[in-house]
Amino acid sequence: VVAAVGISPEQLLPLYPVTATKIYMNLGEPDAIDKYKDLPFDGIGLMRIEFIFTDWIGYHPMYLIETKQEDFFINKLAAGVAKVAQAIYPRPVVVRFSDFRTNEFRGLKGGEKFEPDERNPMIGWRGVSRYIHPKYEAGFRLEVRAIRKVREEMGLTNVWVMFPFVRTLWEVQRVVKILEEEGLKRSKDFKVWAMAEVPSVAILADKFAEYVDGFSIGSNDLTQLVLGADRDSQILAEMGYFDERDPAVLEAIRMLIEKAHSKGATVSICGQAPSVYPEITEYLVRLGIDSISVNPDAVVSTRRLVASIERKIMLEKLDAILKKMNL
Ligand code: PEP
Ligand code: MG
């Protein structure tokens, strides 16, 4: 349609409604940014790097350290992140550190000997618990060095970072220290986020806010863990257990936003929920969420939806004021 009317996607950008809530996009494959860069998003709210691990690097980070190929890892990861950051500069790219489970890490070349065989990898040695353990800390440090290279050597200071599967305050304290030891300190233009996908983060968000600038709700894992319902269980899904609209999940989200905002931390969401359920988007906007990050195919519709919700809220407020004034 755009080609037919003779205007470029870039020229379309100003035609999309401006929203107070930022609209971000999720991305996994760096090259996909060529196709999507002109969509009306305010940044990448979740850049998954697992695709770079499997398709660009292929090897387990600890294997590369053992065989003295650290530079290969750093250069590949930096190139993948830089590709995206360059394409959308100065809009931010929130890069999530690796979030493979042990069974997935084991699938990388040279990976078997570095990974325990877990009965329950979904709630096992995952996310931050890996980065602070001697058996992966060196691998995590390589991930951090790749980010530092992109920010400092390549000058792409629009790259921020995010920790997945955060569980406890003490682990966040330790991982932030490692980040600082590697030369990455929180600042005005370098934000550090924690994913809120384990209920403990929602419960203690005001305490976690001491260590991070913002949170991003991983509604896929949060739903799984609030409801104790395996997100991969087909039978539970068919029975309706895996449902982000469950009141307990919504209450966890409300609590998170309230507690995070009470300490000045921002809140985003990067799980599937707002891509699927418009009523969740409305719920989030009414709670004052700062940004919503959705899949590329949902960016335009989400921006339109959020604009209409914000307008509705504004008119409701106006009505309330007029009523108070007896007008
Ligand atoms: C989530 O849990 O909602 C999320 C965005 O992370 P992933 O789906 O990659 O676990
Ligand atoms: Mg998750």
Image (cartoon, rainbow, N blue to C red):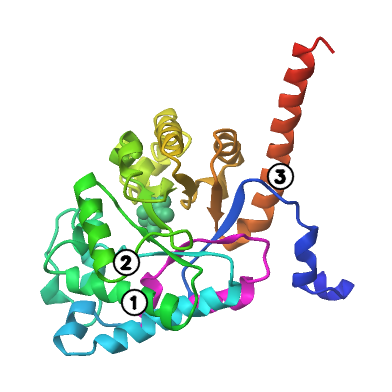
Left/right of residue 37 with respect to residue 81 in the rendered view: right
User: Range of the magenta residues?
Assistant: 30-56
Q: Quadrant of residue 190?
A: bottom left
- Contact check, label 1 and label 3, Cβ < 8 Å: no
Which secondary structure lies at badge 1? helix
Q: Amino acid at mark 2?
A: Ser
- Contact check, label 3 and label 2, Cβ < 8 Å: no
Q: Amino acid at mark 1?
A: Phe
Quarter placement of the C terminus: top right
Q: Mark 3 packing: few (<14 Cα in 10 Å), some, or many (20+)?
A: some
The residue positioned farthest toward the front in the image shown: 188
- Contact check, label 1 and label 2, Cβ < 8 Å: yes
Quarter placement of the N terminus: bottom right
Near-viewer residue (32 or 147): 147
Residue that numbered label 3 is attached to:
307
User: Which of the numbered marks, if any, corresponds to residue 23?
Assistant: none
Mark nearest the camera among 1 and 3 is 3
Near-viewer residue (220 or 144): 144
Q: Kindly tell me whether residue 168 is visible in this rendering.
A: no
User: Distance of mark 1 from mark 2, alpha carbons?
Assistant: 9 Å
Which secondary structure lies at badge 3? helix
Residue that numbered label 2 is attached to:
98
Q: Mark 1 packing: few (<14 Cα in 10 Å), some, or many (20+)?
A: many
Near-viewer residue (4 or 306): 306
User: Distance of mark 3 from mark 2, alpha carbons?
Assistant: 33 Å
Question: Height in image: 107 above or below 327?
Answer: below
Q: Earlier in the sequence, mark 3 or mark 2?
A: 2
Q: Kindly tell me whether residue 327 is visible in this rendering.
A: yes
Left/right of residue 291 with respect to residue 201 in the rendered view: right
